[in-house]
Amino acid sequence: MTAYLEQFGTTTLPPALPESDAGTGGSTLQLTPLPWGGQFDGLGSGVAPMPGDKLTRKGRLIGLSTSNLDGLYKTYRLLRGTRAKLYRRNGDTTQHWCWARLIEVKAKWNYENIVHMDLDFEFQMLSPYWYSVTTHNSAGGVSPTGPADLATVLAESGSTLVHCSHSGNIDQPAVVFEITTTAFASMVVVNNTTTGYAFTYTNTINPGAVLAIDTGAMSVVNNGADDYASFTPPANHEEWMHMAPGDNVIVITIVGGGSFTISYHAAFA
Protein backbone atom coordinates (compact mmCIF):
# COMPACT_ATOMS: atom_id res chain seq x y z
CA MET A 1 0.00 0.00 0.00
CA THR A 2 1.41 3.37 -1.00
CA ALA A 3 1.29 6.02 1.70
CA TYR A 4 3.13 9.14 2.78
CA LEU A 5 3.47 10.86 6.13
CA GLU A 6 1.28 13.96 6.00
CA GLN A 7 0.86 15.52 9.44
CA PHE A 8 2.31 15.44 12.95
CA GLY A 9 -0.12 16.57 15.61
CA THR A 10 -1.75 19.70 14.16
CA THR A 11 1.25 20.57 11.97
CA THR A 12 1.29 19.69 8.28
CA LEU A 13 4.63 18.33 7.10
CA PRO A 14 6.23 20.15 4.14
CA PRO A 15 4.11 19.23 1.10
CA ALA A 16 6.73 20.00 -1.54
CA LEU A 17 8.82 17.08 -2.84
CA PRO A 18 7.55 14.63 -0.18
CA GLU A 19 9.36 11.34 0.34
CA SER A 20 8.30 8.87 3.03
CA ASP A 21 8.93 5.38 4.30
CA ALA A 22 6.32 3.04 2.81
CA GLY A 23 7.68 -0.32 3.98
CA THR A 24 6.21 -2.73 6.48
CA GLY A 25 8.74 -2.16 9.26
CA GLY A 26 10.44 -4.99 11.12
CA SER A 27 9.08 -7.87 13.19
CA THR A 28 9.63 -8.84 16.82
CA LEU A 29 10.55 -12.53 16.99
CA GLN A 30 10.53 -14.91 19.94
CA LEU A 31 13.20 -17.46 18.98
CA THR A 32 15.01 -19.90 21.25
CA PRO A 33 17.98 -21.91 19.94
CA LEU A 34 17.38 -25.66 20.17
CA PRO A 35 20.20 -27.93 21.45
CA TRP A 36 20.03 -30.09 18.33
CA GLY A 37 20.00 -27.11 16.00
CA GLY A 38 17.42 -24.80 14.58
CA GLN A 39 15.15 -22.40 16.43
CA PHE A 40 11.97 -22.77 18.46
CA ASP A 41 9.44 -20.14 17.34
CA GLY A 42 7.53 -19.01 20.42
CA LEU A 43 4.91 -17.26 18.29
CA GLY A 44 3.74 -20.50 16.72
CA SER A 45 1.44 -19.77 13.79
CA GLY A 46 0.71 -16.24 15.03
CA VAL A 47 1.79 -13.08 13.23
CA ALA A 48 4.95 -11.50 14.66
CA PRO A 49 4.20 -8.02 16.04
CA MET A 50 5.89 -4.82 14.90
CA PRO A 51 8.62 -3.53 17.23
CA GLY A 52 7.80 0.11 16.61
CA ASP A 53 10.17 1.25 13.89
CA LYS A 54 11.73 4.57 12.98
CA LEU A 55 9.98 6.39 10.14
CA THR A 56 11.55 9.03 7.92
CA ARG A 57 9.94 11.85 5.96
CA LYS A 58 11.62 14.30 3.60
CA GLY A 59 10.18 17.49 2.18
CA ARG A 60 11.07 20.94 0.91
CA LEU A 61 10.06 23.94 2.99
CA ILE A 62 9.33 27.00 0.83
CA GLY A 63 8.96 30.48 2.29
CA LEU A 64 7.87 33.82 0.87
CA SER A 65 11.07 35.44 2.10
CA THR A 66 14.14 34.58 4.13
CA SER A 67 12.46 35.75 7.33
CA ASN A 68 9.28 33.82 6.47
CA LEU A 69 11.34 30.68 5.79
CA ASP A 70 13.11 31.12 9.12
CA GLY A 71 9.78 31.35 10.94
CA LEU A 72 8.43 28.25 9.23
CA TYR A 73 11.59 26.30 10.08
CA LYS A 74 11.39 27.32 13.74
CA THR A 75 7.88 25.84 13.88
CA TYR A 76 9.29 22.42 12.99
CA ARG A 77 12.30 22.79 15.28
CA LEU A 78 9.97 23.29 18.24
CA LEU A 79 8.37 19.89 17.53
CA ARG A 80 11.62 18.00 18.15
CA GLY A 81 11.21 15.54 21.00
CA THR A 82 7.42 15.92 21.22
CA ARG A 83 4.86 13.12 21.17
CA ALA A 84 1.74 13.38 19.00
CA LYS A 85 -0.39 11.56 16.47
CA LEU A 86 1.43 10.98 13.18
CA TYR A 87 -0.90 10.81 10.19
CA ARG A 88 -0.31 9.07 6.88
CA ARG A 89 -2.30 9.56 3.67
CA ASN A 90 -2.90 6.33 1.79
CA GLY A 91 -3.08 5.79 -1.94
CA ASP A 92 -6.87 5.43 -1.71
CA THR A 93 -7.00 8.90 -0.02
CA THR A 94 -7.94 7.49 3.41
CA GLN A 95 -6.01 8.68 6.45
CA HIS A 96 -4.51 6.60 9.27
CA TRP A 97 -2.67 7.62 12.45
CA CYS A 98 -0.30 6.22 15.05
CA TRP A 99 1.33 7.61 18.18
CA ALA A 100 4.87 8.73 17.44
CA ARG A 101 7.67 10.91 18.77
CA LEU A 102 9.70 13.24 16.58
CA ILE A 103 13.33 12.31 17.20
CA GLU A 104 15.14 14.76 14.96
CA VAL A 105 14.73 17.38 12.23
CA LYS A 106 17.72 17.48 9.90
CA ALA A 107 18.43 20.46 7.66
CA LYS A 108 21.40 22.06 5.94
CA TRP A 109 21.90 25.69 5.11
CA ASN A 110 23.94 27.06 2.22
CA TYR A 111 23.97 30.21 0.15
CA GLU A 112 21.29 28.83 -2.20
CA ASN A 113 18.77 28.33 0.66
CA ILE A 114 17.24 31.79 0.41
CA VAL A 115 13.53 30.90 0.34
CA HIS A 116 13.62 27.09 0.49
CA MET A 117 15.15 24.41 2.69
CA ASP A 118 15.13 20.61 2.47
CA LEU A 119 14.18 18.94 5.74
CA ASP A 120 14.55 15.34 6.94
CA PHE A 121 12.24 14.20 9.77
CA GLU A 122 12.86 11.08 11.83
CA PHE A 123 9.97 9.68 13.89
CA GLN A 124 9.84 6.83 16.39
CA MET A 125 6.59 4.91 15.94
CA LEU A 126 5.11 4.14 19.37
CA SER A 127 1.87 2.36 18.42
CA PRO A 128 2.00 -1.27 17.27
CA TYR A 129 -0.23 -0.52 14.27
CA TRP A 130 -1.85 2.28 12.29
CA TYR A 131 -5.44 3.19 13.16
CA SER A 132 -8.48 4.64 11.42
CA VAL A 133 -9.30 8.27 12.14
CA THR A 134 -12.91 7.45 12.94
CA THR A 135 -13.90 5.42 16.02
CA HIS A 136 -16.16 2.41 15.60
CA ASN A 137 -18.89 2.15 18.21
CA SER A 138 -21.37 -0.59 19.07
CA ALA A 139 -23.95 -0.34 21.83
CA GLY A 140 -26.64 -2.45 23.45
CA GLY A 141 -28.19 -3.60 26.68
CA VAL A 142 -28.64 -6.71 28.80
CA SER A 143 -31.80 -7.44 30.74
CA PRO A 144 -31.52 -8.32 34.46
CA THR A 145 -30.51 -11.91 35.16
CA GLY A 146 -30.79 -14.20 38.13
CA PRO A 147 -28.10 -15.43 40.55
CA ALA A 148 -24.50 -15.11 39.44
CA ASP A 149 -23.81 -18.73 38.62
CA LEU A 150 -20.78 -18.64 36.34
CA ALA A 151 -21.70 -21.81 34.46
CA THR A 152 -25.10 -20.33 33.64
CA VAL A 153 -23.55 -17.02 32.68
CA LEU A 154 -21.11 -18.63 30.28
CA ALA A 155 -24.03 -20.52 28.76
CA GLU A 156 -25.23 -17.05 27.68
CA SER A 157 -28.23 -16.82 30.01
CA GLY A 158 -29.31 -13.19 30.13
CA SER A 159 -26.74 -12.19 27.53
CA THR A 160 -26.73 -10.02 24.44
CA LEU A 161 -24.99 -10.92 21.20
CA VAL A 162 -23.53 -8.04 19.20
CA HIS A 163 -21.82 -8.04 15.82
CA CYS A 164 -18.76 -5.75 15.59
CA SER A 165 -17.46 -5.14 12.09
CA HIS A 166 -13.72 -4.47 12.06
CA SER A 167 -12.82 -2.77 8.75
CA GLY A 168 -9.05 -3.06 9.28
CA ASN A 169 -6.71 -5.69 7.89
CA ILE A 170 -4.98 -6.83 11.12
CA ASP A 171 -6.16 -7.89 14.59
CA GLN A 172 -6.95 -4.98 16.92
CA PRO A 173 -6.09 -5.70 20.60
CA ALA A 174 -7.15 -2.25 21.87
CA VAL A 175 -10.89 -2.17 22.58
CA VAL A 176 -12.75 -0.19 25.24
CA PHE A 177 -15.79 -1.78 26.92
CA GLU A 178 -17.95 0.51 29.07
CA ILE A 179 -20.80 -0.95 31.14
CA THR A 180 -23.38 1.27 32.83
CA THR A 181 -25.95 -0.19 35.22
CA THR A 182 -29.32 1.06 36.41
CA ALA A 183 -29.36 -1.41 39.32
CA PHE A 184 -26.67 -3.31 41.21
CA ALA A 185 -24.65 -5.63 38.97
CA SER A 186 -22.33 -8.35 40.27
CA MET A 187 -20.60 -9.83 37.22
CA VAL A 188 -19.66 -8.95 33.65
CA VAL A 189 -18.50 -11.48 31.07
CA VAL A 190 -17.25 -10.47 27.61
CA ASN A 191 -16.67 -13.24 25.09
CA ASN A 192 -15.49 -12.66 21.52
CA THR A 193 -16.62 -15.97 20.06
CA THR A 194 -14.87 -15.19 16.78
CA THR A 195 -11.34 -14.93 18.16
CA GLY A 196 -11.75 -16.89 21.41
CA TYR A 197 -10.86 -14.02 23.74
CA ALA A 198 -13.04 -13.89 26.87
CA PHE A 199 -12.66 -12.15 30.22
CA THR A 200 -14.66 -11.81 33.45
CA TYR A 201 -15.18 -9.06 36.00
CA THR A 202 -16.61 -10.10 39.37
CA ASN A 203 -17.44 -7.25 41.71
CA THR A 204 -20.37 -4.98 42.51
CA ILE A 205 -21.13 -2.17 40.08
CA ASN A 206 -23.37 0.38 41.78
CA PRO A 207 -26.44 1.81 40.01
CA GLY A 208 -25.40 4.50 37.55
CA ALA A 209 -21.69 3.68 37.87
CA VAL A 210 -19.51 2.97 34.84
CA LEU A 211 -17.16 0.01 34.55
CA ALA A 212 -14.50 0.78 31.93
CA ILE A 213 -12.27 -2.04 30.67
CA ASP A 214 -9.58 -0.88 28.24
CA THR A 215 -7.93 -3.93 26.71
CA GLY A 216 -5.22 -1.86 25.01
CA ALA A 217 -4.11 -0.04 28.16
CA MET A 218 -4.95 -3.16 30.23
CA SER A 219 -6.88 -1.10 32.77
CA VAL A 220 -10.03 -1.85 34.76
CA VAL A 221 -11.80 1.11 36.36
CA ASN A 222 -15.04 0.85 38.38
CA ASN A 223 -16.66 4.23 39.05
CA GLY A 224 -13.30 6.00 38.70
CA ALA A 225 -11.35 3.60 40.93
CA ASP A 226 -8.86 0.97 39.76
CA ASP A 227 -10.18 -2.57 40.29
CA TYR A 228 -7.81 -4.86 38.42
CA ALA A 229 -8.04 -7.32 41.34
CA SER A 230 -11.61 -8.22 40.31
CA PHE A 231 -10.64 -8.94 36.71
CA THR A 232 -9.84 -12.36 35.21
CA PRO A 233 -8.06 -12.06 31.83
CA PRO A 234 -8.43 -14.53 28.97
CA ALA A 235 -6.82 -17.90 29.47
CA ASN A 236 -3.77 -18.75 27.35
CA HIS A 237 -3.52 -15.25 25.87
CA GLU A 238 -1.02 -12.51 26.69
CA GLU A 239 -3.41 -9.80 25.50
CA TRP A 240 -6.94 -9.21 26.73
CA MET A 241 -8.79 -8.96 23.43
CA HIS A 242 -8.37 -9.38 19.72
CA MET A 243 -10.85 -7.93 17.25
CA ALA A 244 -10.27 -9.79 13.98
CA PRO A 245 -10.76 -8.20 10.55
CA GLY A 246 -14.36 -8.64 9.44
CA ASP A 247 -17.34 -9.64 11.57
CA ASN A 248 -16.75 -10.35 15.28
CA VAL A 249 -19.53 -11.99 17.29
CA ILE A 250 -19.28 -10.78 20.89
CA VAL A 251 -21.45 -12.01 23.75
CA ILE A 252 -21.91 -9.54 26.62
CA THR A 253 -23.30 -10.83 29.92
CA ILE A 254 -24.17 -8.46 32.77
CA VAL A 255 -25.51 -10.15 35.89
CA GLY A 256 -27.97 -7.55 37.14
CA GLY A 257 -28.47 -5.96 33.74
CA GLY A 258 -27.27 -2.76 32.18
CA SER A 259 -26.12 -1.10 28.97
CA PHE A 260 -22.77 -1.24 27.24
CA THR A 261 -20.70 0.39 24.52
CA ILE A 262 -17.80 -1.12 22.59
CA SER A 263 -15.41 1.33 20.92
CA TYR A 264 -12.22 0.85 18.92
CA HIS A 265 -10.27 2.13 15.95
CA ALA A 266 -9.80 -0.13 12.94
CA ALA A 267 -6.19 -1.38 12.85
CA PHE A 268 -4.01 -1.54 9.75
CA ALA A 269 -0.57 -2.98 9.01
Image (spheres, rainbow, N blue to C red):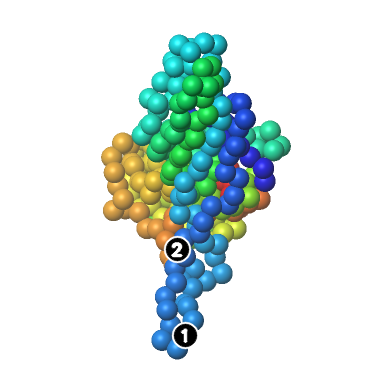
209 vs 13, left or right, is left
Q: Is residue 45 above or below residue 19?
A: below
Q: Could you tell me residue 20's position as x and y percent?
A: 58, 39
Which residue is more in the foreground, 176 or 95? 95
Q: Quadrant of residue 58?
A: top right
Whether tag 1 and tag 2 are in contact, CB under 8 A, the answer is no
Query: For numbered disc 1, what is the local secondary structure?
Result: loop
Relative height, residue 56 to residue 255 (above, below): above
> Which residue lies at the image location 52% right of the left edge and 47% below the top edge?
129
Q: Position of residue 98 (x, y in %)?
A: 50, 40
| Number of marks | 2
* Point 38% across, 31% down: residue: 80
Q: Amino acid at mark 1?
A: Gly
Q: Nearer the viewer, residue 149 or 66?
A: 66
Label 1 belongs to which residue? 37
The residue pinned by badge 2 equals 237
In the rendered image, residue 66, in percent from the top left (x then y), is placed at: 48, 13
Q: Amino acid at mark 2?
A: His
In front: label 1 or label 2: 1
The residue lying furthest to the bottom in this view is 36
Residue at 41% in and 36% down: 104
Q: Is residue 166 visible?
A: no
Q: State which tag comes first along the sequence, 1 or 2.
A: 1
| Local crowd size for mark 1, using a 10 Å CA cut-off: few (<14), some (14–19), many (≥20) | few
Q: Residues within 10 Å of mark 2 (few under 14, many from 20)?
A: few
> Which of 155/75 is in front?
75
